[in-house]
Amino acid sequence: MSTGNAESEPPSRAGSRVPSGRGPGRPRDPRAHGAILDATLTTLLEFWYPSLTLERVARRAGVGKATIYRHWESKLDLVLEAAAPHLAIGVVPDTGDTRRDVREGLDQLISTYADPVAAIVIFAVLAGLEPDERLRERFRSAYVLPWRASMSDALERGVARRDLPARLDVGFAVDMMVGTVFQRVLVVPEPLVDGLAEHLLTLLLHGRLPTR
Amino acid sequence: MSTGNAESEPPSRAGSRVPSGRGPGRPRDPRAHGAILDATLTTLLEFWYPSLTLERVARRAGVGKATIYRHWESKLDLVLEAAAPHLAIGVVPDTGDTRRDVREGLDQLISTYADPVAAIVIFAVLAGLEPDERLRERFRSAYVLPWRASMSDALERGVARRDLPARLDVGFAVDMMVGTVFQRVLVVPEPLVDGLAEHLLTLLLHGRLPTR
Amino acid sequence: MSTGNAESEPPSRAGSRVPSGRGPGRPRDPRAHGAILDATLTTLLEFWYPSLTLERVARRAGVGKATIYRHWESKLDLVLEAAAPHLAIGVVPDTGDTRRDVREGLDQLISTYADPVAAIVIFAVLAGLEPDERLRERFRSAYVLPWRASMSDALERGVARRDLPARLDVGFAVDMMVGTVFQRVLVVPEPLVDGLAEHLLTLLLHGRLPTR
Amino acid sequence: MSTGNAESEPPSRAGSRVPSGRGPGRPRDPRAHGAILDATLTTLLEFWYPSLTLERVARRAGVGKATIYRHWESKLDLVLEAAAPHLAIGVVPDTGDTRRDVREGLDQLISTYADPVAAIVIFAVLAGLEPDERLRERFRSAYVLPWRASMSDALERGVARRDLPARLDVGFAVDMMVGTVFQRVLVVPEPLVDGLAEHLLTLLLHGRLPTR
DNA sequence: AATTAACCGAGACGGTACGTCAGGTCTTGAC
DNA sequence: GTCAAGACCTGACGTACCGTCTCGGTTAATT
């Protein structure tokens, strides 16, 4: 049972309602917790976010609805935790080689966007499927900002090494790369990932757009 | 923007059910039709797409629910028609000046994305809020593809005039621009549109990323 | 009348869906159940059966529509339970005195028919207001047949005691009495109950029709 | 087309909305009128009264809904006219022979009650399926009262001829007969008409109940 | 013969009620 | 004191009819 990551997970715990100790009483059943997460994932893939109902998840997990509400505050909250392993993107490394670092970061980005679960969740968050702004903020700070910060750092290092233009608008460069990947992976009818990272690298480092 | 395609076809009518003659019978009441569209727009802005219910629209429009179902097949169908004026983006012009054409196209794109109604609808369509694939296809062919085609044409003309590299991968260039705009206008917490079009133009024409 | 069959079976429960134990889970809220029955009765008296809508009952009872559907399968089902106390007619007693037994039975019949709630429900059942034949059958077996059987028994005892003609067609006699009461109480514009039981008794026992 | 009785019909016309002359203008189309009545009858037999909708009748008759409302004021109004031939019961004759007159009257009553259309309409009227009291009154005065009056007359003649007891309570006798017939023909699960008229005659004339 | 008013079919209109479903909360008895 | 179960109220869903209305077209009596 359970998609696991019980030990690896700083971000996956982000959505849980403080399960910490308060006196006696029966502790939470970890089997229920895992079963709910599993059921959430499979249901998500099958029905997408808007048609995922907590009742169906409860039924599949063999769990009472109230148990879900006890563990998570909302549907998005639950989904974010269930999808956490698919959303975890890591950080851009620092090897001393600008091209290698950026290339690694772009590969992380592309493979994350290419994950069906991630795609479903990203759209759900962007589309404001839940009116709760705090959740969007949590999503940003857990998955978006760390990667952006480390990519920005990588670019700054590239500037320092003269691999990139002096005083480069790093934010623009990051948005350009992220936006292009988003567009080619998630928006066009069929994902176009062949050579994508390399094209972006060439554009970034040499200002050359790809040719046919 | 977007006095655009007034002559090519009436996209606002695209969602209506059988708008033309079927024998005798009382014709549609244009007052009801208009009231529903108005109520849809204001409700959309207030509640976003997922919380927009047809019942509330009917109440606001002072109209029976059945009338809405008589005019439109689904919620997305209705919303697409109501939002049509906000989504109409026109086409990239052909003035003989590459920079001017692309600049105009980017301005169209940015101002469309900056429209709150457009943003709500675009997310709703992208996020697959309705399982109906035909609607997504209708959206693409009505709003996305014509602009992309005309922007691609503009780039091809730029290639022919040697303003752009020979054998430029036009699709990539378009996705790069669209993706960057999407990212900066719709995804980051606060829209970043200052100089956006100009930055993209410089990158496209001269391979130079903006500086701080 | 009709403290009657308190011990034979609880007819008021006849219409309830699965009223008994199925594992854990929150039990039915008796306050909701009772409020719905009360609202049904008052609405029935005010609007008669065909204009009684479950939506209005729900509104009056301060209850969700779904709760009604959870407790009863149909409108008639609900009405039958709400009206049960007004329909309960008891059985014809066995005192050893034919005249007294039949007289008691007729009084039961007349006062039941004279109850406005009973009248409304009886007509609803007879008129086939619900296409469900099983409900009509339930009504018959709960209220009609027991009384008829006990009245038939009383007449048989009267035959045995020579108070009534040998080989009397008991079914005919019962239908004659029931039909006459039905006609005089429910069909004519103003109920005509004065002397009704006595007239029927005289006709039954002595073959004499009443005079003016 | 049309169940006819266009010429015989005092009562059938009772429900029509004064079609009389006011200036020029097209007169009512008798084909539409007849088609509606036909569709009403077949629909009535198939769906019973409560499930008979004017929309279905209009569809079957190939007629606009408004045409029905132009001709009749209400559903019961329409049904009463469509069913008129099945409800027409005639009057008890005056042959000088009490037994023969009453027998004829009972036969009329029994065969009317045995008509499925009549049964459906009678129940609809009795059950108060329409809150309009005037319609019930119209039904009474058109079908019920004339027959009752003529039957009462026949009984009075029987009293005068000493075939019946002096000062007989004629109203009671009529209700007894009508009620018994109603009960045996319309209420019991299977109609019991064998010997019914004869049994009632024997009871009326000789005070003897039937035997097995 | 032209006019004209009421007819006709069709069906849109604002409503009410239907029976179902899911949301989020609350309650019970078992563990 | 958490668990599964499930009842509770709320409110939206999409459909069916209601009774009224408005069309364009037809038809017969009145001019």
Image (cartoon, coloured by chain):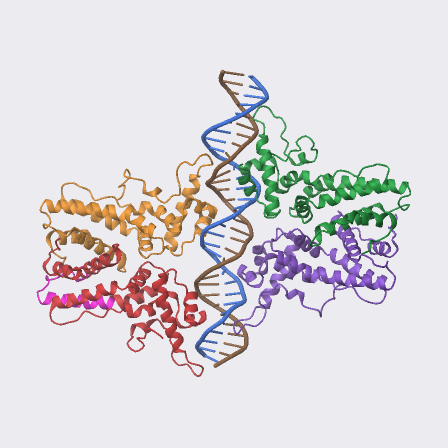
Chain colours: A red, B orange, C purple, D green, E brown, F blue
For residue B11, above or below residue A29: above
Residue B9 x %, y %: 30, 39
| Residue B62 showing in the rendered view | no
Total number of numbered discs in the rendering? 0
A6 or B212, nearer to the observer? A6
Assign the N terminus of chain C to one quadrant of the image: bottom right
Residue D72 place in picture, x, y as percent: 61, 37
Q: Quadrant of residue D112?
A: top right
Decide if residue B90 is on the left or right side of residue C192. left
- Residue at position x 74%, y 58% from top? C112
- Which residues are the magenta region? A145-172
Q: Where is residue B148 in the image (x, y as percent from the top left)?
A: 22, 48
Q: Where is residue B202 in the image (x, y as percent from the top left)?
A: 13, 52
Residue at the bottom extreme, as displayed: A24
Q: Nearer the viewer, residue A178 or B116?
A: A178
Chief secondary structure of the magenta portion: helix
Q: Is residue C105 above or below residue B59?
A: below
Residue B82 in the figure: left or right of residue B112: right
In-front residue for pair C108/C147: C147
